[in-house]
Amino acid sequence: MRPNAGVESMSTETGAIPETEAPPSPRSAGSGDRRRWGLPAMALPALSRLEWAGLLLPMLALTILALRDLGAPSLWRDEVSSVIFAKGSLGDLLTIIGRDRAEVGLANMATYYLILHFWLMVGETEARIRLLSVIFGVLSVVPVYFIARRLAGWVAGALAASLFVLIPYVIHYSQEARGYSLAMLMAGGMTWLVLIGLDRRERIWPWLAYGLIGALGLYVHFFMALVVAAHGLWLLVTRQVPPLRSSVAAVAPLAIAAAPIPFIIVEFGGEHEWIPPLTAARAYVGLEKLIGGAVPIIVISSLMVAGAILWRRDRRFWLLVASVLVPILGAVAISIVKPMFIPRYLIMVLPALALVAGLAIVRLEPLVARAATAVAVIVMLLVGLPSAYFTTTDINWRAAGRWMAEEVETGDHVVMVSWRDSPLEYYFLRFDPPAVPQRLRERDALAADVDGRIWLALTGMQPPEASEKLELFLPRYRVEEARRFGRRAQLFLLVPLGSSPAVAEAATLLPSAGPSPGLEGR
């Protein structure tokens, strides 16, 4: 059987040559040595200088965009959770069933936490922690480029890669200390491996690599299962299921990794009660955030339709369409039973989305229409670029933790009214305080006299609501000092009444509604 038997050949309209038929190049020297040692020949062909530019320039662009103000905002709650969980013991991090949620979090991002565990050796500043996500995001450009190059040449690869790096969600989640950029990298890489495996049907290694990456991907985010479903559905519909041993190599790791997931869902199925029920309006708003706005939705949808017409005879294009639509429709179907439709949970569709748009553009005729459309789409994405730096949190936890660490005294207590206050504790401890206040429940602080000062953290509240909460403490305490660390973050230092003369009325110490000067955030 020919290496690419069963795979539709390149359309002569593109003028592209399948990589499996490319003549040997001096720059690919060493492939014979790999074969002699039984290692797989690399899927990366030799590249000309223009082809290297088509790959490296988008990677450089995303690097620059993702490094912008990388360390400026303090870590928000979910990022702090990533760091705290990554510091768990290696034994706990490698556990899936019976995982200690208080120590290493849910298994949903277990792969990312494990990698971050070792990455923290680089350092624990905000920029260094987030740099891991930047690396994953930039590497995601590689499969996007080579998939498009395989289907339509290096110009298509450069265009698809350029569109990908300008999607606001790609930039934003390449800056966040969570596993979403890793999910993009794995989704793009798995799609690439499907195409390589079909071109080299006699080789088992692409399918084994697919299975191993997919197995790890399931524990980057459970929705990676929808990417696997898209690939599997496409293989079945197009009747391109790989040979038995290749199928086993792909399915076995996935099956082993997926086996515990039903038990995890049963045990922790109520962890996402904060997600509201899905409605048509919520679904549309979610897609707007994912793709970059209302205009990009219209443009990308139009390009998908155009691509479906122009590429209708090439089944590989439909693999990319499936990699976009199946996860989205799957998330909608899941949300009918259990609301789970959150835009960032679907970030793994963005590599395929950029590919669909880029491949549609390169098939447009005449050349003027192709060039004009490419420029218009790139300009559209550039206009929306500021939205990539949207504010995940408007609270300067770093400044709050520093102030508390500088002023804390032995015998102090702390009352955190909201469960969202975990970053305050993280930053407080990071500044090596001379003493650690005792955690006190709100009702205990209100029910009896407390010997010592109280740090009262009120976050996630508008000033009127925070004032009402503070008034509950005023019969027993006076406000020694109050500071504001964002629009909805206030920290009060309370002293029991009678311990020292009152220096001011508590109401006069309440901060104004405006943000504090120099607030770091985005």
Image (cartoon, rainbow, N blue to C red):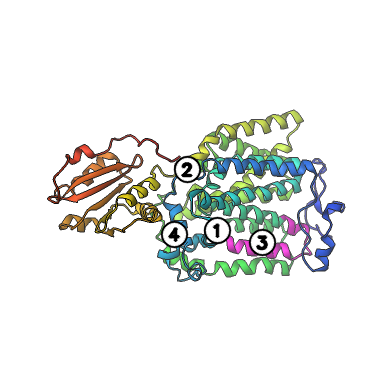
Residue 84 is labelled as 4
Q: Give the CA separation, mark 1 to mark 3.
A: 24 Å
Per the rendered image, the range of residues in magenta is 195-219
Tell me if residue 25 can be seen: no
Q: Residue at x 15, y 58 (%)?
A: 448
**Majority secondary structure of magenta residues:** helix
Distance, label 3 to label 4, CA atoms, is 30 Å
What residue appears at the point 21 percent right and 43 percent down from the top-left corner?
Answer: 468
Answer with mark 4 or mark 1, whichever residue precedes in sequence: 4
Q: What element carries label 4?
A: helix
Query: In this view of the protein, which residue sits in the foreground, 103 or 290?
Result: 103
Comes first in the chain, label 1 or label 2: 2
Residue to which mark 3 is pinned: 210
Amino acid type at image mark 2: Ala
Residue 198 painted magenta? yes
Frontmost residue, 294 versus 513: 513
Q: Helix or strand or loop: what does disc 1 sit on?
A: helix
In the rendered image, the quadrant that contains the N terminus is bottom right
Secondary structure of residue under mark 3: helix
Inter-mark Cα distance, 2 to 4? 20 Å
Alpha carbon separation for disc pair 1 and 2 = 20 Å
The amino acid type of the residue labelled 3 equals Tyr
The residue beneath circle 2 is 72
From the viewer's perspective, tell me whether residue 382 is left or right of residue 366.
left
Relative depth, front residue between 145 and 123: 123
